[in-house]
Image: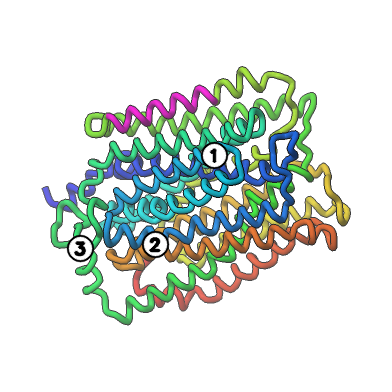
Amino acid sequence: MSTTTSEANAFSLLGHKPALFVLFFTEMWERFSYYGMRAIFVLFLTSTFAEGGWEWSNEKALALLGTYTSLVYVTPVIGGWIADKFMGYQKAIALGALVMTLGHASMALDTETTLYMGVGLLIIGNGLFKPNITSIISGLYDKFPERKDGAFTIFYMGVNSGGFIGVLLCGFLGENLSWAWGFGLAGIFMMLGMLQFWFARGIFGKIGLQPSKKVDLSDAIDNIAGDEVEEKVPAYIQRDRYIVVGVLAFFVVFFWAAFEQASGSMTIFANNFTQRVLSGNSALIFKIVDTLITVVPLGIITWVLFKLFQQTFKKISLSNIVLGISFLSIWGIAIWKLYVYLPQDRPEIPASWFLILNSLFIITLAPLFSKWWESKYNPAATVKFALGMILLGIGFGMLAWGSATIPQGAKTASVSLVWLVIAYLLHTMGELCLSPVGLSYVSKLVPAKKIGLMFGVWYLAIALGNKLAGLVGSYIDVIVDKYSMSAFFLIFTIIPAVVGVILILITPKMKKMMHGVH
C-alpha cells in the first residue's frame, strides 16, 4: 500500500484522524478552565462584600481583565520558541497544563496575593500550552493541507465545547455557591486535561516529540522536514506570504478588541441592564431551554467521546479512562444542577449564563462552516475575515438598537434578553469566519520549522486586541454617563464594519501574494 493511501486511510474518525480528537478533548478541558474562570472573574471582582466579592469598580476590574487576557496571548511567542528549539510540543503542552492547574488552585484561595499569583501562573502556562497544541495539528495534516481548514474548525469545536461547559458549570457554582467553588472547579478539570493528554502521547508518533529542528513531521516519509520544505519555496514568494500573515494579524486586532467585550462590558450589561428576573411561563420556558442546552450538547460531545473510545481504547486506554471519569463528573454536576438545585424557585438568570451562547452556537454551526470551507464555494482568506468583521459589527448594532431606550447615565435597566441572544449569534458567526481559519492560514503560509513561533506571533496580535478590549471597555461608565449605552455599543458597530469593507477591497492583492495557497 502506498504512503498516500495509508495516510488517507488514517482519517477514520468522522473523516479525520483520531489524534485530532485527542487534541480536541485536551483543548476542551483547557478552555473549560479558562472560560469558566473568565465567566466569573469580573462578576467576582465587582460584586459586593456581602455577595462574596471585592467591590472593585468596573474600570479597575475590566483593566485587570484586559491585562490578563492580553498577556495570556503574549507568552505564546516565548512558549512557541521554547518548544521549537528545546522541549518539543508535547512536553511544552504538558508543562503548561501543570502550571495552569497550579494557577487555578491559587485563585481558589480567595486572597489578593493568591489572585495575582494565580493570574501569573495562568499567563505562563498558557504560553507553553497554546501555540504548541495547534502546532501538533499542523504536523498531523502536513501532507493534507486541503483538510486543514476543516480540521481546525473541528478543533475549534473542542475549544468552544470546553468554553460552553466551563461557563455553564463554573458560572453556576460561582454565582450560586461561592466564587471559590467556581475557580476551584476550573483547576480540577485543567488537571484532568493534563493527565488525559500525557497518557495519550503515543498516538501522535514523532510529531512534537522533539524540537522541530530535530523531528520529522511524518512517520512515513523520513525526508520531509521543515528545512527542506522551506528550501523548495523561493525567498521572494515566502516574503509575500509573511506579509499576508502580517496583514491578517493586523486586522485580527480589531476583531478581538470588539469581540472580547463578551466577558467584560457585555457581562456588565447582562448583569446590570438586562431583564434577568423571570416569572410564570417565562421562567418555565427558561428552565426547559436551559435543560435542553445543557443535555443536548453534552450528549453530542459524549457521542464523539464514545467514537474516540472505539478507535483508540486499546492504544491509549489510560488516557481514555481519565477522559471517561471527567465526563462522568461533568454529567453528575449537570444533573445535580438541573434536577436537584434548580427546581427550587430561582427565576433569575445568572449573568454568566449568557456567555454560554457563544460556545453553544459554535458547537451548532461549526460543522456547517467546516463543510462550507471544504466546498467549491470556499472564499478567500480576506473575504472570510471581512465577513467576520461585518457580522461582528451588526451584532453590536443590535445591542446599540436594543439599548437605545436606556437613559443617559443610568446605572440599571431591564432591556430584553433577546438583544443579547441575537448579538451572540451574530458574533459567533463572525468568529467562525475568522478565528479557526486564521490558524489554518498561518499553518499553510509559514514554513514548517517556523510554525510554533508564528503561531506565537499570531497570538501576539490577539493579545493586543484583548488589551484594547479591556482598555475601551473600562470606559463604559464614562461613555454611558456622558452619552449613552447605545453610543458605547456603536463604537463596536462602526469600526468592525469599516475594517470589513477594507478587507474586501484588498482581497485581489492578498490572493496574489499568497502564491497559490488557498
Viewer-nearest of discs 1 and 2:
2
Kind of residue indicated by mark 3: Ala
The image position of residue 472, as x and y in percent, is 68, 62
For image coordinates 49% across by 28% down, the residue present is 330
Q: Nearer the viewer, mark 2 or mark 3?
A: 2
Residue sitting at the far right: 407
Could you tell me which residue is drawn at 60 percent across and 38 percent down?
Answer: 110
- Residue 401 image offset from top left, x and y in percent: 78, 54
Label 1: few (<14), some (14–19) or many (≥20) C-alpha neighbours in 10 Å: many
* Residue picked out by circle 3: 225
In the displayed structure, does residue 92 sit left or right of residue 261? left
Picture quadrant where residue 253 is located: bottom right
SS category of the residue bearing label 2: helix
Residue 70 visible in the displayed image: yes
Residue in the image at 43% along x and 50% along y: 125
Q: Which residue is mark 2?
A: 78
Q: Which stretch is magenta?
A: 318-333
Q: Label 2 amino acid?
A: Ile
Is 185 a magenta residue? no
Of callouts 1 and 2, the N-terminal one? 2
In the figure, 326 relative to 77: above or below? above
Left or right: residue 437 compared with residue 259: left
Tag 2 and tag 3, C-beta contact below 8 Å: no
State whether the magenta stretch is mostly helix, strand or loop. Answer: helix
Q: Closer to the N terminus: mark 2 or mark 3? A: 2
**Residue bearing the label numbered 1:** 164
Point 50% across, 73% down: residue: 507
Q: Amino acid at mark 1?
A: Phe
Q: Position of residue 319 (x, y in %)?
A: 31, 33
